[in-house]
Amino acid sequence: MGGNGVQLRVRGKVQGVGFRPFVWQLAQALQLTGDVCNDGEGVLVRLAGNGGHFTARLRQDCPPLARIESIDTQPFHWSTLPETFTIRHSAGGAMDTQIVPDAATCPACLAEMNDPHERRYRYPFINCTHCGPRFTIIRAMPYDRPATAMAPFPLCSPCETEYRNPADRRFHAQPVACPDCGPELEWRAADRVVTRELALNAAVQMLKNGGIVAIKGLGGFHLACDALNPQAVATLRARKQRPGKPLAVMIPSADGLPQPVQTRLRSPAAPIVLIPKAWLPTFPDDIAPAWIASV
């Protein structure tokens, strides 16, 4: 039986990166019909016709967190030609795909978080398909919300609308949440328990007073202190039994650092970067013997 379409098997880091909505948008732009879904091997795209420039555009314009390793193309036969392009529910199968690491908060989410008119204003768990947790919240593949640590948080109506809209940057962003339906900050100290802004304020006050705060993150606990307080830094070193190894330092801005360092710090990976101590002279000597690990 002759084929009246084409099937593309896309492998690599293509789940949890907004790849399906990107495929949907590309199909709309090229006026193609068919469908796309996640499965155990990656992403499967089926198109009516020969696809034209679709494959080339797939590689050229793929989402920033995606990494395409291979695209295998073969003929496909539609019993009934599709009239639109749709996103199918994820399929199962043997697992042979990758999940991307967590990504630093993207510029769009940062702007939204700092805008008093946005409903996610000052919400610390903001994310979209271009940023936020991935590897640390997944429990099974394919990468869908029920198989992540976000499963216990049902979406509110506005988040559900974003999650279901292929044209939205939060389409199928599995960790999507807001102050009304997602996780919240919580402060625990002795018998005191407070949440949200009160929790943040309590942590800030503890740091300002020279204390050490244990921050539960996605990958475990971070012990934090005021990096400009020599006594607090010395106490942290003693408690960690870490006499000489450089401590990671969080800085409010990469401005003023050499451009290659700024580029790395502002990338989606936002890695820890070792820099000479002289580049950040205001920090106490106990931060590092000769180098500073900057975040």
Image (tube, rainbow, N blue to C red):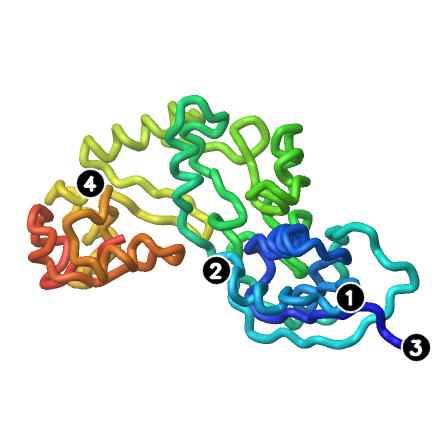
Comparing 288 with 64, the one in front is: 64
Q: Nearer the viewer, mark 4 or mark 2?
A: 2
* Residue 59 percent across, percent down from the top left: 55, 67
Identify residue for label 3.
1
* 294 and 116: which is toward the camera: 116
Residue bearing the label numbered 2: 101
Image location of residue 274, percent across then percent down: 21, 63
Q: Earlier in the sequence, mark 3 or mark 4?
A: 3
Count every numbered label the image shows and give the total.
Answer: 4
CA gap between label 2 and label 3 equals 42 Å
Does dot 3 land on a helix, a strand or a loop?
Answer: loop
Reply above or below: 44 against 24.
below
Q: What residue sits right under mark 1 in the picture? A: 49
Left or right: where does residue 88 sit relative to residue 269?
Answer: right
The reply to whether the C-beta atoms of the residues labelled 3 and 4 are less than 8 Å apart is: no
Q: Which residue is mark 4?
A: 226
Residue drawn at x 20%, y 32% is: 208
Question: What's the residue at 10%, 62% (across, down)?
Answer: 289
Tell whether label 3 touches label 2 (CB within 8 Å).
no
Residue 110 shown left or right of residue 171 in the figure: left
The label nearer to you, 2 versus 3, is 3
Q: Secondary structure at mark 4?
A: loop
Q: Depth-wise, is mark 2 or mark 1 nearer the camera?
A: 1
Mark 2 residue type: Pro
Give the alpha-carbon distance from disc 1 to disc 3, as whole Å: 15 Å
Q: Earlier in the sequence, mark 2 or mark 1?
A: 1
